[in-house]
Amino acid sequence: MEKFVTYEQIQEAVQAIRQRATIPPRVGLILGSGLGGLADAVQDATAIPYPEIPHFPQATVVGHAGRLVIGHLESQPVMVMQGRAHYYEGYSMAQVTFPVRVMQAMDVEILIVTNAAGGLNPDFRAGDLMLITDHINLIGMAGLNPLRGPNLDQFGPRFPPMTQAYDPELSDLARRAAAEAGIPLREGIYICLAGPSFETPADIRFLQQIGADAVGMSTVPEVTVACHGGTRVLGISGISNVAVASPGETEEPSHEEVLEAAQLIVPRLSTIIRGVLRAL
Ligand code: HPA
């Protein structure tokens, strides 16, 4: 049986969170693989482990702390996910995106979503940051769309447009924050695969040819649900490794490598996100 999510389940999670944290968050932040460090900087913080929130998917992967942190960052009321659940962990797409529904039910206006990704664009290097300007929903095209199942009319329409999934004004704020801090910010298109296996060289050449600049195993379902509910989105990928397009070309990717690169990415990513929060 497909595991859909109900409005009642979302409300139960919201109630449990509101019992613990009184700050009404304006900005939601999802921190991807190894990128959770920024959550430790949240002030007036209430941290709630995911297992203590009803129906919340658990983050089972190393590099994902699995805590919701509510408080202030750069004076903005924020709700930070320190780690996320992925489809490959065995959740349905509706479960993976349940936290975004909870944010929407708590009146979060803006979602800042981050991830670790493999670089497909030959100009990209490990450690680069990429502003996501659009995405290719490859798994969604293949049927794994988080909006499959009964439409949650409280949030949005049956057939939501995805014409401008990534908010141009927020993107401009990120460009400005990066420029002011002297941080190079690449731009490009993110493509989401189901994982957990990494790609073959033929996969990589295919993904490059269809126009993707970075590949990962998250983000697109969350952004789809964000758009459905009218939440404005800013997306940034940390390029943790360069995808291998021909056999034997470079080292094989590994989760350890992804986490190592994340350590280098976190300070610059945090600077950009803080700059955006200050400008909001
Ligand atoms: N492929 C898919 N997902 C990823 C990668 C990759 O090379 N690196 C980090 N997440």
Image: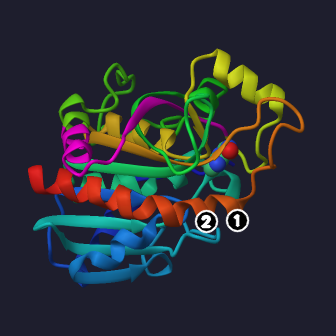
In front here: 265 or 1?
265
Q: Which residue is mark 2?
A: 260
Q: Bounds of the magenta span? A: 173-193
Numbered mark located on residue 229 in the image: none
Q: Is residue 252 left or right of residue 140?
A: right
- Observer-nearest residue: 203 or 160? 203
**As drawn, 98 above or below 173:** below
Q: Amino acid at mark 2?
A: Glu
| Number of marks in picture | 2
**Residue under the point 34% across and 29% down:** 165
SS for callout 1:
helix
* Residue at the spot 19% in from the left edge and 54% down from the top edge: 275
Q: Disc 1 vs disc 2: Cβ atoms closer than 8 Å?
A: yes
Decide if ligand 1 comes within 8 Å of the CB at mark 2. Answer: no
Magenta-colored stretch includes residue 175: yes
Residue assigned mark 1: 256
